[in-house]
Image (cartoon, rainbow, N blue to C red):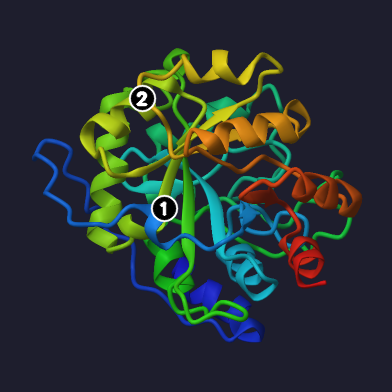
Amino acid sequence: MTLCLRTVSLLAIFSAMGCGETTDHTNTEDPLPASSAVTEQDTAPAFEIQGHRGARGLLPENSIPGFVIAIREGANVLEMDLCVAKDGNLIVSHEPWMSHAICTTPEGNAISASKERQYNLHQMSTGEIQAFDCGMALHPQFPEQRHLPVQKPTLAEVVEVTEEVPLLKSDAKIRYNMEIKHREDLEPEYCPDAVTFAQTVIAELRRLGIEDRTCIQSFSAAALNAVHQQAPTMTTAWLTNSKGPVSSELTKINFTPSIYSPQWESIDANDVHDLQQQNIRVIPWTVNEAEDLFAVMQMGVDGIITDYPDRLYKLRKN
């Protein structure tokens, strides 16, 4: 049974639709086609409820069921992570290996922390990757998470399903925030170089027809600079995990990003105001508790990345 058929059976309770088979559509040698996509600023919702890795507090992270439930619980943006398989397919995964915390081998065996990097996605085919389960292990950080047998999907498989899921209280289409999981110290064993990685992602977004509804984010300055060079109108978010001044963080990339995405405890209302005065939207990560969600909203941010889109939706609704 294919990943998508398994996913459809899991999603019956969500009224989601199925997806097609995985194929390799990557061609990083050809120049990227011209795009007429409008900028994300033109069509973004007034406030972005971003489901972090889907709805990690509710269902397994970066899984198709998790993305579906995120939309059904109020997310208008799906946040996810991208790695590259050996066959060139974009795999939705936070690490470029099988995390010992959430994945088990095809034989059902646990993976130790010391050996997880041996299961290198960049050296595995899509079929080999999808033989592993990444949804049944208990997650100590998320006691409310429901466990399901899920595999790491391709980006194409995710989009095939999520495009058919209606948003709550809106006729708009779902939007995407995709992180390029690039680190120079992981090249070339675990990921492509920044230029190739950016080219691969942009080409797939255009092939899938979602470029105008997608933001590309990264902690990698090299990757984000490459995205802006190859697709100047592409919406970008600069992810930061520093307590340093915002002005210093912005100097680490060579252009002005559409969005500044800091760890939520590292900014205040003054930072938010200053960034918005520069026409930079502010969407911090990852805020989960109700009192913290409310406090961050009071800063005047443009959206929030959360493992619990249901909590944020209810707060916004009230």
Ranked by sequence position, the earlier of labels 2 and 1 is 1
User: Whole-percent x and y of residue 128?
Assistant: 44, 48
Q: Kindly identify the residue that appears in the image at 65 percent across and 53 percent down.
A: 61
Say whether residue 252 is left or right of residue 99.
left
In terms of secondary structure, where does tag 1 sit? helix
Say which mark, if any, is on residue 110. Answer: none
* Residue 212 falls in image quadrant: bottom left
Marks 2/1 in contact by CB < 8 Å: the verdict is: no
Count neighbours of disc 2 (C-alpha within 10 A) and say few if under 14, some if 14 to 19, many if 20 or more. few
User: Whole-percent x and y of residue 90?
Assistant: 37, 47
Count neighbours of disc 1 (C-alpha within 10 A) and say few if under 14, some if 14 to 19, many if 20 or more. some
Say whether residue 79 is left or right of residue 72.
left
> Does 224 appear above or below 297?
above
Identified by mark 1, the residue type is Gln
Question: Count the marks: how many?
Answer: 2
Q: As drawn, which residue projects farthest toward the front?
A: 277
In terms of secondary structure, where does tag 2 sit? loop
> Does 128 appear above or below 84?
below
Q: CA distance from mark 2 to mark 1?
A: 16 Å
Taking depth in this image into account, of 150 and 288 the one nearest to the observer is 288
Judging by the rendered image, the residue that carries numbered circle 2 is 255
Taking depth in this image into account, of 107 and 22 the one nearest to the observer is 22
* Residue 242 falls in image quadrant: top right
Say whether residue 235 is left or right of residue 246.
left
Q: Kindly identify the residue that appears in the image at 75 percent across and 66 percent down.
A: 316
Judging by the rendered image, the residue that carries numbered circle 1 is 41
Say whether residue 192 is left or right of residue 14.
left
User: Whole-percent x and y of residue 295?
Assistant: 84, 46
